[in-house]
Amino acid sequence: MRPHIIQPDRPPGQQQGQPPYGGHPGAPGGYGPGGYGPDGRGQGGYDGYAGHDDGYTGDRGSGGRKLSPKVLIGIVVAGCVVAGLVVGGLLNSGGSASADNAGGTSSTSPSAAASASASGSDAPAAADPAKQQAQSLDALLKTSGNSRSSVVGAVASTKECKDLGAAASDLRAAQAQRTGLVTQLGSLQVDKLQDHAALTDALTKAWQASAAADGHYANWAHQAATNKSVCKGGHARTTKEAEEGNRQSGTATEQKKRAVKLWNAIAEKYGLTTRTYSQL
């Protein structure tokens, strides 16, 4: 009869015949690193070890390692955070670019607008003061010949002793019109025109002489109407008033010829109306 050997108490979970963890390598039935199992085969250092330090669990069937649920959850959360940061950065970058672009296309600095306005092809050219003065004088010259036909007709009627009262009235009206031309000429600015002093002098003397001639012719018509000795045989006798009228008319013609040469040079330069002396 064999003696009964009392085995020491096993740690919980230790199977019968299995030495404690960390048994000496090579000891009978040892399962420590480099030890041998009951079948004599070597055991891998950590095969079958349920370690918790690195977050992996041993799998006796496959010998591989799996991610623990906690690690998986951590990876998923970290991935979501990274993705959120990337998307947020892209959105912020796009919004800023859009805002910058919108601001760039809709805003224009006052200095740039002023520079463009100043250098634009549509900007009006500055008016030429000399041309403006020439245009004003041209408008006055258009009215200078308005009384010419009436004067010619009144003088012809006086010579023939016809309609003497109407002739005298027309001549007085012409005299007033020529005097008015001198007044209007004096109010015009012509200092930018070439030879403006000579032109003004010639026009003034021409219209003054014409006004004087009209006055003398009007007096002649009155003489013919009131003095029977003036009108004989249907023709008016030449009196001193008629002679003075002829002299003043000659002076007016001389000054008009002088003035029209000066004016036509200006008119050609600015594209205005050229004239003959009889139109002044």
Image (cartoon, grey):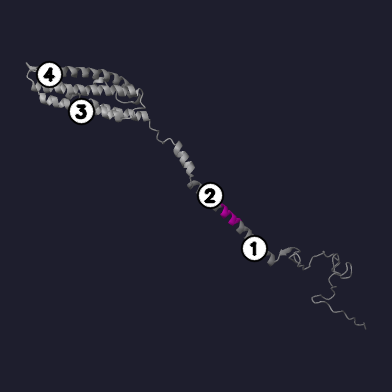
Kindly indicate whether the residue at mark 4 contacts the one at mark 1 (C-beta within 8 angstroms): no
Mark 4: secondary structure:
helix
Q: CA distance from mark 4 to mark 2?
A: 93 Å
Q: Could you tell which of marks 3 and 2 lies nearer the N-terminus?
A: 2
Q: CA distance from mark 1 to mark 2?
A: 34 Å
Marker count (numbered):
4
Residue that badge 2 annotates: 100
Q: Could you tell which of marks 4 and 3 lies nearer the N-terminus?
A: 4
Q: Could you tell which of marks 1 and 2 lies nearer the N-terminus?
A: 1
Q: x, y (%) of residue 236?
A: 10, 17
Res 143 quadrant in image? top left
> What residue type is disc 1 on?
Val
The part of the chain drawn in magenta is: 86-93
Q: x, y (%) of residue 277?
A: 26, 20
- On whether residue 101 falls in the magenta region, the answer is no
Res 48 quadrant in image? bottom right
Q: Residues within 10 Å of mark 3 (few under 14, many from 20)?
A: some
Residue that badge 3 annotates: 176
Q: Residues within 10 Å of mark 4 (few under 14, many from 20)?
A: many
Q: Nearer the viewer, mark 1 or mark 2?
A: 2
**Left or right of 26 on screen, residue 66:** left
**Which label sits on residue 77?**
1
Q: CA distance from mark 3 to mark 2?
A: 75 Å
Q: Residues within 10 Å of mark 1 (few under 14, many from 20)?
A: few
**Which label sits on residue 159?**
4
* Point 44% across, 39% down: residue: 117
> What residue type is disc 4 on?
Lys
Q: Nearer the viewer, mark 4 or mark 2?
A: 4
Say which of 128 and 180 sits in front. Answer: 180
In the depicted structure, whether residue 14 falls above or below residue 102: below
